[in-house]
Amino acid sequence: MGKIIGHLLRASTTRFVVGCRVSEMESPAFGSLIRVPLLVGTEIYGLIYDMHIDDDGLVRQLVTAEDIDPSVIADNRINRNVPLEISVLAVGYNQDGRIHHLLPTRPPLSLDVIYKCTDEQLREFTTGRFGYFRHILRAKDLPVDELLAAHLRDAHKANAESGNSEWIHVATQELIVLLRDDYPTLMSVLSALSDIQIPREKVT
Amino acid sequence: MDTKDNTNSQQQIGYVVGGSLKENLRVRLTIPAQAIQEGGFVIIEGGEWQFYGLVIDIQLGATDRRFADEQSETRLPQDIARLLHRKTLYTNLEVLPTLMLERGPEPGSPEYQSWIEQIDLGQRPPPSPLPVKTIPPHHVPVRLAGAGDIAEIFGRQGERGNFVIGYTREGGHPVCINLDKLVQRSSGVFGATGTGKSFLTRLVLAGLMQDDNTAVLVFDMHNEYGYDDTASDTGQHVIGLKTKFRSRVNVVGLGQGAQIRGQTPDFNLEIAERDITPEDIELLTRELNLTETTPTTLEALVGSFGRKGWFTAFRKMKSGALIETDGGKKGPAPDSVAAWANSAGVHPMAAEALHSKLGRLFRLPYIVENPASEGIREIVDVLESGQHAMLSFGRHETDLDYLLVSNLLTRHIRQAWEQRTNDFRSKGAQEPRPLVIVVEEAHKLLNREMAAQTTFSTIAREMRKYYVTLMIVDQRPSQIYDEVMSQLGTRISGWLGDDDDIRAVLSGLAGRDVLRGMLARLQPKEEVLLLGWGVRMPLPVRSRRYDKQFWNELQGKSGGKRDEGQILKELGY
């Protein structure tokens, strides 16, 4: 099933925001693939592109105080009134067992449960086609290069574990094709990809 | 019938990405650029039509100029840089489509079956290569030509009249020229000095002689075709045509007692004075610096002594000889030029000037009053009987020798072949055997000034109908009269450096601009470009070597062992 990350706060067709407790913050990461089961047989996939921690009145007062007691800090984090917000980019959905790299037909509803995808689910979603790249590349306001690098690192790990270490090359090649008319973006994406630590095999 | 040849299973090298009939086709290369060279013969599988083309340019391209400008391999890890290059940097070929061949519908389909049946029943002409009138669609595969493709266009090795002149540069597939077609129009072998023109000419002549359908007359200025020789640059022994074809090749030496490369020729050519006509002299106008009065004087000489006797009589006259007359005055002696001039009503000064200028001819040792044999007649007879003659000039190497002898001989040949052709056409006599006259150092006889003085330009222009054609061998084609150059059917050219020479070789051909670069970039040795009417499309080839193996192959001897690889290569694998 994958770990529960939190519950849906608000959503649109292209993006949604998940609220979670600090204790739930450990498993999701920037670039992780998450899923939101809707009705029976349908789930929406998304990539985490932002994690947002809002302040509240108490935090504002506490930051001005001197020598905050660790127990106060812990209490504030565990019992805070304002949830942590995780922003997600919708990248596809699964209907009746078939994965589509299209925008979901409708957004998830408030308080829908959000799960982190397992490696198996990540493999399933990324195998074969890369249609979901277009949702990422269209989101000009996001750090596309970083998001892609984080996602490719995760996905490569999942695919390499099942023996498909070529996946990263095919995905990189697809990105090059999609971005070759946009030199600055492509170079910054490739530069980000060069920074992810993966054992590189020789491209044949 | 099966138009699909199974010897064409060549690897795909790319696919069509654009182009037009006017501006050639662009092919995206999918193999390393160095695997293809300019002049490569490629096949474009365009559905119902198969296109034949020549690679005329190889271009490096990039989807964005910045990908090419930036050395991304220094910024990115090697594998990412390689992926980037693979998708953003590319090589395009510019392909000149030259011919197209109908391939019919998809093999195996009912339409294909009915197409084949229509051809077999004669309801539809069998596919043959046509000039390109359309272009292939996008993305159709392109491959290098296989042995079968080459044979489709240039003829199959072993078929009558086909002679392997060389091999394709990429695949090493044999490329033939059709000898029957070669001799139907005048032809030319060109190339800068040292590019192997003489060897190439020997190859072609050996082919013609072995084919035994054509008579060959060689004006052998440097005495190199008949007997064995030593190559000037490599020092290797070169087999002469006489050595191989023995009695079918007659080496003729100019002048009595001439020795050619230390050997006695089959017979000697001496020119009888009676064979020299006023027209022969008029053709030498420029060489002998004759004046406008010459025709009148010559006419008077013929009037006085007849067409056969004028030359001897004129030679015997004395120039400026005087005797004392009865009145004590000095007057022209009876055997003087002036005396004859006075009696014939010609201005004595004009006659004396002509006599003095013809002195160069009078002194030529091979012009004699009564030759031991009818040399010219013998040569014509030899050629008419289908044998070959190599006229070696020996030590007579001046322009005057070339002009006089070649003019005289070709005039006789022309008369003989015109007569035979007319007999064939009107009286149903035997068809004359085609005759090829090979002219070495052709610019000496066919340059702008000389062309008017020789019968060669007439032969090049008009004698095709009378079965006589020229084969011009020269290193400075730009020096040859344009009117002759434009008449050349088949042109075989080695490397040429001079722009004017290149322009001359390409005169009158389509796609000159494209071929110009190809000609200038041939290997200086052993690569030639086949051009012109006699070949269906231009093609650079690695020329065949004139060596022992060539003779073994030509004369059907099993000869030296050929390795398995070579045999397979020749079969197209």
Image (spheres, coloured by chain):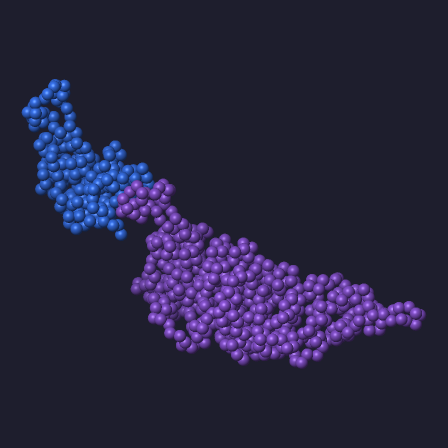
Chain colours: A blue, B purple
Residue B275 placement, left or right of B384: right
Residue at image point 71% right, 70% down: B361
Question: Quadrant location of residue B488?
Answer: bottom right
Residue at image point 52% right, 62% down: B194
Across and down, in percent, residue A197 comes to 20, 42
Question: Quadrant location of residue B121?
Answer: bottom left
Quadrant where the image shows the C terminus of chain B: bottom left
Nearer to the camera, B433 or B62: B62
Nearer to the camera, A57 or B49: A57
Which residue is most to the front?
B235
Nearer to the camera, B504 or B352: B352
Residue at image point 59% right, 77% down: B265
Quadrant where the image shows the N terminus of chain B: bottom left
Across and down, in percent, residue B382 comes to 58, 78
Observer able to see residue B159: no
Residue at image point 33% right, 41% down: A181
Observer able to see residue B315: yes
Q: How many marks?
A: 0
Residue B210 placement, left or right of A140: right
Question: Quadrant location of residue B135?
Answer: bottom left
Across and down, in percent, residue B122 comes to 41, 69
Across and down, in percent, residue B331 comes to 87, 69
Nearer to the camera, B284 or B320: B320
Residue A43 placement, left or right of B85: left
